[in-house]
Image (tube, grey):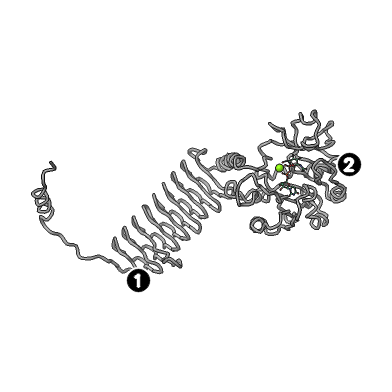
Amino acid sequence: MTGTTTLTVVLAAGEGTRMRSSLPKVLHPVAGLSLVGHVLSAAPNGKDDAVAVVVGPDHQAVVDEIKRVRPGAAIFTQKERLGTAHAVLAAREAIAKGADDLLIAFGDTPLIGAATFQRLRAALKDGATLAVLGFRAADPTGYGRLLVEGDQLVAIREQADASEAERAITLCNAGVMAFAGKTALKILDQIGNGNSKGEYYLTDAVSIVRELGLRATVIETDEDEVRGINTKSQLAEAEQVMQRRLRQAALDAGVTLIAPDTVYLAADTTFGRDVTIEPFVVIGPDVSIADGAVIHAFSNIVGARIGKKASVGPYARLRPGTVLGEGVRIGNFVETKAAAIDAGAKANHLTYIGDSHIGENANIGAGTITCNYDGFDKHRTEVGAGAFVGTNSSLVAPVKIGVGAYIGSGSVVTRDVPNEALMIERSQPTVREGWAKRFRDMKLLNRKPKH
Ligand code: UD1
Ligand code: MG
């Protein structure tokens, strides 16, 4: 739909008390992204498209998240919660700029898809002044009911104001709407608060459109797409719906998921070609997995770039700032954090690599630990290309191990090691021939009968 501009106003001033959480409702995550983040990602995002978000007072954390996800978004505060139309008008300044299409969405409906916004816009293009997203509710209680005649939407009746006959209607208002931009403000300004709750209802826009002799219409969608989140159970349901979608999208993109239902993805996970993910893998935000990489079972990955043909796990934990080069092998019980591990390097067993750079083809032996923290500050470890770190070594940062150097197993490395050197820290072994037998004999001789 080129040549038209949109403004999406997202209402996020909700209190969310039923979440029983100190986190504002719209910041709860689904697939690693906040509820409001999902809505902002689905909103039209062309270069001429604008977004405005209406937040409650004292919601700095919400403002920060909005700026992170859509840096260009305009943010407005609704000081008093006087209803959905009142909330929309908090963004009056943005609306007055006169985009062609004005879209309204709620910040607590994370499953809304970009295609649905486009369907609503298409209805405007077909001549409607207002297009409302509707759905058939399994249980319509609490929703606004859509009163339709033919292909026209006549009114939306809120639960509290509906007659018994109207309450039997299952076609409900999802809350998402599209207004033709040129008349939007005029319509919104006419909405009053003469209803049982004394609130300014956005839904009253429908009858105003009709009174102006203009057309309002309904676009239907599936209930799953417009689930609003008010409780932790609804949050968990939304997570399941989102995970199903993400798994399906990954499969469609050619990712091999051996047991899709056991794999958790994030909304922003990206995959190359021929990636395989084994069962019981959990992937958090900001992860990319390049061509041919394999993630073995029971791995947990957040904030990591995984290079081509890399192998991760089973039972690996990759934390933020991990960057694995091509063919890197990270094996079982290995944890990495803020670690760049270059092509061909290996850490196959039982290791912690933090605040480190590991050069190409280096070998990090089993049980190697980078001691990156002194109780106050973090320090860096540098391991040169082709270096060999023997098992059970402690690399006490800050420390540099040179290119091609060897570290004897069990060493505590506290000083830099030059290129091609051997560093070994070991006391002389003591072997006493026959000691064990003498010890055992002495013990047996002295043993007193128990009774
Ligand atoms: C609203 C609709 C109802 C629809 C339902 C779908 C109205 C009058 N009713 O009812 O028809 O079926 O959503 O879920 O629009 N908000 C503000 N400021 C306010 C009031 C609300 O920002 O003063 C925001 C809330 O944070 C929320 C959204 O608007 O994101 C909807 O408000 P809510 O109180 O949940 O409306 P419902 O009663 O659910
Ligand atoms: Mg609601």
C-alpha distance separating marks 1 and 2? 79 Å
> Residue 9 location, x and y as percent?
75, 51
Q: Residues within 10 Å of mark 2 (few under 14, many from 20)?
A: some
Give x and y (percent) for residue 13. 71, 51
Q: What label sits on residue 214 in the rendered view?
A: 2
The tag on residue 415 is 1
First-in-chain label (1 vs 2):
2
Q: Using a 10 Å C-alpha cutoff, classify the residue at mark 1 as few (fewer than 14 neighbours), some (14 to 19) or many (20 or more).
A: some
* Residue 252 shows in the view: no
Tell me the SS state at disc 2: loop
Q: Quadrant of residue 363?
A: bottom left
Q: Is mark 1 on a helix, strand or loop?
A: loop
Q: Nearer the viewer, residue 211 or 230?
A: 230
Q: Ligand 1 is in which quadrant of the figure?
A: top right
Q: The disc labelled 2 sits on which kind of residue?
A: Leu
Number of marks drawn: 2
Disc marking residue 199? none
Q: Which of 25 and 401 is in front in this view?
A: 25
- What's under tag 1, amino acid-wise? Arg
**Can residue 322 be seen by looking at this rendering?**
yes
- Ligand 1 near label 2 (Cβ, under 8 Å)? no
The structure residue drawn at horizontal position 75% and vertical position 55%, both measured from the top left corner, is: 79
